[in-house]
Amino acid sequence: MNKNLVLALCLIVIGAATTVAAKVYIYIDAPATSKFPIAVPSFKNMNTLPDKHRIGTSLSSVIVEDLESSGLFRGIDQASFLGNPDSSGITSDSINWDDWSLVGAEALVRGGFYQEETGIRIEARLFDVIKGSFLTGKRYFGKPDDLRLISHKFSDEVMLRLTGQKGIFLTQIAFVSDRSGTKEIYMMDFDGHNRIQLTKHRSIALSPAWSPDGRELVFTSYKKGNPDVYLRELFYGREHWISHYKGLNIAPEWSPDGKKIVLTLSEDNGNSDIYIINTKGEKISRLTSEWSNDVSPCWSPDGRFIAFVSNRSGTPQIYTMEVRTKKVKRLTFEGNYNTSPAWSPRGDKIAFAGRYKGRFAIFTINTDGSAFTQLTFGAGNCETPSWAPNGRQIAFSSDESGSKKIYSMLTDGSGKKAITSGKGNDTSPSWSPYLNYR
């Protein structure tokens, strides 16, 4: 799985690693924080070879897109830049700090690239404009096809240095699409680029879910006729048929420790109940045994609870259960159809899809049942939410454009944008954990 995209990476300055714990420029959880102004001019061509691959503009534009997607940054318009950035260097002593301060930038990314016989060498540096000081820098080596990945890598460096927290720019999203004619599992970067088809079952594949280390996916497929659960190793492409009990084997999700999977089975008289199995498909425990249908389980980040959907009250509603005691609590009381719960990585909220005025919208609710909040409005149905690993963004599907596409938004409902396009329907996004191998 893209093993060739692993890039050579080293610190430009040894002291840069020691500065990460220093000043925090952006407090992510501060209320009503204004967006941090940052300037990212095109990367400078450091040798005389023509820039046939638009390397300079590609790197800067992706970095700006990444940072703005976080809701924390405002990229300074390049049209407002003073002078000619290409005429200056990319080191502290060659930068005119007044030019950047006058356009309102508080941080500056400067970079250069060298086209060599074996590939492209890229240097990227982050500066504090107010102090005129170097903050951090990296050197990368790759091919033209690696430019987006390199940009995402440095965006993560900027995020970490300025906020003290990881960025999500190297994460990926698994999803279901019928663009090939049948429902298959796909994977893409967090921004919708570099789409890869993972399964070719030519059947119906559903509900992908990432392992905690991001190296495997579990999902349901009708490949053999029955809805069974498969495990796919992403690096090697191997698939394992792990849960094939009679009836439904659907909506699997990994436990936070990566040792168990919670899912819905219906082998007992066709009634849907929630079970825990190990990664070989062996049953560990049965969590529900109601007359009702209990489906769509998801774990809390600490592994102590699950949220799930049940119609035991007459309509589908969100419930939580303490796994050890099996004590159940009803969470949602507003609306007559609430489904697809997803527990925030921070542990404080659950996102779900609820029917409102005839359409499905994305909502969040605190785990104690308070702060019932609608996030999406307008035309179309919005369904199957999935949290980014930083707990600040949510992916979901919406059919507001006609066919279903994957969208993302900030957790207050702002910044909504489509991240898939083209033919077919794209549904059931599953946002990866942080991926340390990219």
Image: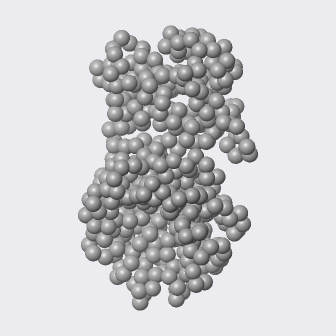
- Name the residue: 43% across, 33% down: 150
User: Residue 345, image x and y in percent?
Assistant: 59, 56
User: Residue 252, image x and y in percent?
Assistant: 44, 68
Colour scheme: one colour
Indicate the quadrant where residue 30 lies: top right
- Name the residue: 62% across, 73% down: 335
Point out the image quarter for the C terminus: top left
Residue 158 as seen in the image, left or right of residue 115: right
> Along the line of sight, which residue is nearer the eye, 10 or 200?
200
User: Residue 344, image x and y in percent?
Assistant: 60, 58
Residue 154 as seen in the image, left or right of residue 31: left
Depicted 19 relative to depicted 206: above or below: above
Depicted 136 relative to depicted 191: above or below: above
> Along the line of sight, which residue is nearer the eye, 76 or 238?
76
For residue 212, say whether it is visible.
no
User: Residue 299, image x and y in percent?
Assistant: 55, 66
